[in-house]
Amino acid sequence: MSGRADQWVADQLWAEDLAMALVDAARKVGAAACDATVGLSASLQASARDGAVEDVTRSQSRSAALRVIVDGKLGLATSSDAPTTAADIEELARTAVGIAALSSSSPHNVVLPGAQMTANEVREAGEALRTWDDDTALLDPAWPVERALLTERVVRGHEGVSGVRDVSAGVRRGLFALATSTGFLGSMRGTTAQLSCSAVVEDGSKKQIESWWSQARAMKGVQDAVVVADLAARRALARRGARRVPSQSMPVIFDPNMTRAFFGGVLAVVSGEAVARKQSWLADAVGAKVMPAGLVLVDDPLLRGGFGSRVFDGEGQAAEKRVIVDDGGRLTGFLLDGRSAARLGLPNTGQAARGSTSLPHPAPTNTTLMGGSGDLAAIVGDTANGLLVTKLLGRGADATTGDLSRGAAGFFVKDGAIAFPVEDLTIAGNAREMLLALDRVGADVDERSSLRVPSVRFAALSVGGT
């Protein structure tokens, strides 16, 4: 094992030991139940402009937090600089207990029994998920600097491109450890590498700006810089001459980027937290058909190499794959952590997400929309007249009603082909009705984030134009 690999294993053990020390200290000063989190992260980012390196930024952090429950009252104390001495650990514990004394008691404040796994077993299972890459974790400045410079040079080399808004490349490594008073101890680690670019094209009195990006767990998985630059440039050049079209009802196609924005809103309202707060347009939909049959929405924290992959959730529950919408199009339930499950009187689904200094909250992991066929080109080819949306502006659907109205840009589709670019449009509908109106779903799943979705088409939406 290399020296740096030895150090990263040592960091993982150190984080676990500190989390356990915080739990022990909290119990000694009066916490009936508690859990502790420790986070280590480091990142390196480079940007380029005008053929030169514009900025190189490196950041590191070691943070910790302690959540305690005393007489049903919750206290959270955090430290942006993780404690390193017994006195510092005790001070954080006393602070958390003191904060709890000022809080209100609630039966929903709970620390759950954790997964029946040893810390060694958790680490081994984490390695099998392939979320860590040693070369990426090294944070060698050469990789982001070279990629940023090459990407900027290539995008500027396209005829018609007048400049760039931003070009950046970066690498990151992170570690998260959790210990609970109920006996759980575990840690996870991960790396990511990313490259992004935006191109600027003069279009009369306007500027057309489009971007492209790539992200992977390892540097070798990121798209080539030339590919990223070419895609950004071609997308911007294709926007020249964009115009409005008359208001009408028509089929509307979303490319995967836009599908991600839409389904991000869907996942937000199947959160138990949103349901408990009565801010969900799917609050009454469990067991009801919410999508066309044959489509499935799956959340899988055990996906190898996924950006949301994990062995345990933010409360130490064992990670499990679950179906959110089954092949009959029915919503099977909500995403729940311990608190939201208690508030709703439902079984916990182990969906707690958590940063190293935050409270748990329900959230998805790796979510994939499955069951489609073909790709964006095939969906466009099957559309007589419609709108292909590649950019959305404004907020998503109203969390309570599902009503949606957003600015949009993209391309008008005529006779199964892209006819011309469009802009300054508005699309409107109701998100729940839109889900049921999905009449085409592709198999071109975009895997660049934890929300993995394909191109889709809605049978008809209101499009506001001239």
Image (cartoon, rainbow, N blue to C red):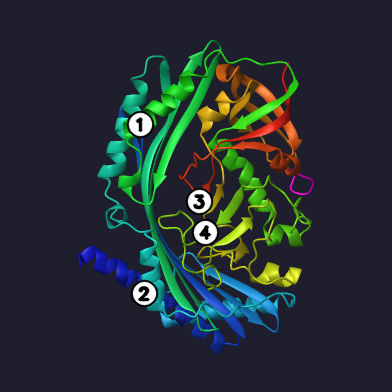
Give the distance between the C-alpha atoms of the residues marked 1 and 3, in whole angstroms: 22 Å
Q: What stretch is highlighted in magenta?
A: 398-402
Percent coordinates x, y for residue 126 in the rendering: 40, 67
Q: Residue 290 carries which label?
A: none
57 vs 294, left or right, is: left
Q: How crowded is mark 1: few (under 14 residues within 10 Å), some or many (20 or more)?
A: some
N-term-proximal mark, 1 vs 2? 2
Estimate the x, y position of residue 110 in percent, counting from the top left.
Answer: 65, 77
Which of disc 3 and disc 4 is earlier in sequence?
4
Q: Residue 66's image quarter?
A: bottom right
Q: What element carries label 3?
A: loop
Q: Measuring 69% from the left and 67% from the top, which residue is drawn there? A: 340
The residue wearing badge 4 is: 300
Q: Residue beneath label 1, please? A: 227
Residue corresponding to mark 3: 450
> Residue 319: in sight, yes or no?
yes
Q: Distance between the residues labelled 1 and 2?
A: 41 Å
Residue at label 2?
A: 14
Residue 33, x across and y down, in percent: 60, 83
Which numbered disc, 4 or 2, marks the residue that appears first in the sequence? 2
Marks 4 and 2: CB-CB under 8 Å?
Answer: no
Residue 184 at what x, y percent from top left? 50, 80
